[in-house]
């Protein structure tokens, strides 16, 4: 019964003639290690890969074709993280020590209002100010990855130093 069904379906399908595949010669050019930027994806959220968190915002990710340079940039729209609104992270794995550079920038509003006295004198001071405080955060680091895998088990550890 199944054999008959296969035969019937085979006869219903149109016959496609074999055609010659045309080959196009593509130009070959040398790949430069300086091709560091290759934007491959973006997200309508802010993705913090080092902290494994997702917030409202925007993220752009880039990795070159050799996989040695990884760049992530983004805007964090979460009001709790005003001091880190903008973020760019660069990781270079082309040399044996892995180099990381992380820069974050943001601002917070500072508002102070009221009357204050000083213990040294009897004056009453009135204060009414609203200021913007700009925050800059720069972290640089280097790490040495070690792979001590053996057999069916994967074992890795990494030693490094960071400067904030």
Image: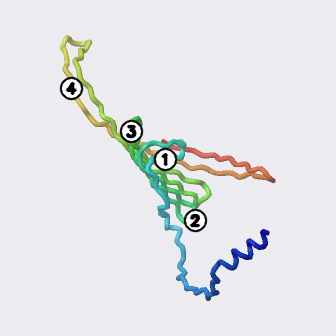
Asked if the residues shown at circle 4 and circle 2 are in contact, with their CB atoms under 8 angstroms apart, the answer is: no
How many labels were placed on the picture? Answer: 4
Mark 1, other Cα within 10 Å: few <14 / some 14–19 / many ≥20: many
Vertical placement of 3 versus 67: above or below? below
Cα distance in 3D space between marks 3 and 1: 16 Å
Q: Earlier in the sequence, mark 3 or mark 4?
A: 3
The circle drawn on residue 66 is 2
The circle drawn on residue 83 is 3
Say which quarter of the image contains residue 65: bottom right
Mark 2, other Cα within 10 Å: few <14 / some 14–19 / many ≥20: few
Between 34 and 119, the residue placed more toward the observer is: 34
| Residue shown at the point (55%, 85%) measured from the top left | 24
Task: Name the spot of residue 131 as percent of width and height, x first.
Answer: 26, 34
Secondary structure, mark 3, is: helix
Look at the image and name its color scheme: rainbow
Task: Name the spot of residue 117 as percent of width and height, x first.
Answer: 23, 14
Cα distance in 3D space between marks 4 and 2: 56 Å
Q: Earlier in the sequence, mark 1 or mark 4?
A: 1
| Residue shown at the point (38%, 38%) measured from the top left | 82
Secondary structure, mark 1, is: strand
Cα distance in 3D space between marks 3 and 4: 23 Å
Most extreme residue toward the bottom is 20
According to the image, label 4 marks what residue? 128
Q: Earlier in the sequence, mark 1 or mark 2?
A: 1
Between 54 and 138, the residue placed more toward the observer is: 54
Quadrant occupied by the N terminus: bottom right
Q: Earlier in the sequence, mark 3 or mark 2?
A: 2
According to the image, label 1 marks what residue? 47
Cα distance in 3D space between marks 3 and 2: 34 Å
Cα distance in 3D space between marks 1 and 2: 23 Å
Secondary structure, mark 4, is: strand
């Amino acid at each position: 019964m199944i054999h008959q069904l296969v035969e019937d379906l085979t006869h219903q399908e149109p016959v496609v003639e074999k055609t010659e595949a045309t080959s196009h010669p593509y130009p070959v050019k040398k790949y430069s290690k300086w091709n560091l930027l290759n934007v491959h994806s973006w997200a309508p959220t802010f993705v913090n890969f080092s902290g494994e968190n997702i917030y409202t915002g925007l993220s752009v990710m880039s990795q070159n074709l050799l996989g040695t340079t990884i760049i992530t940039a983004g805007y964090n729209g979460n009001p709790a993280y005003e001091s880190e609104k903008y973020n760019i992270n660069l990781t270079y794995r082309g040399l044996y020590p892995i180099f990381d550079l992380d820069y974050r920038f943001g601002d917070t509003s500072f508002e102070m209002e009221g009357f204050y006295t000083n213990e040294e004198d009897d004056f009453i001071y009135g204060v009414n100010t609203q200021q913007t405080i700009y925050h800059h955060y720069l972290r640089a680091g280097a790490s040495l990855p070690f792979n001590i895998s053996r057999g069916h088990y994967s074992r890795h550890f990494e030693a490094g130093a960071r400067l904030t």
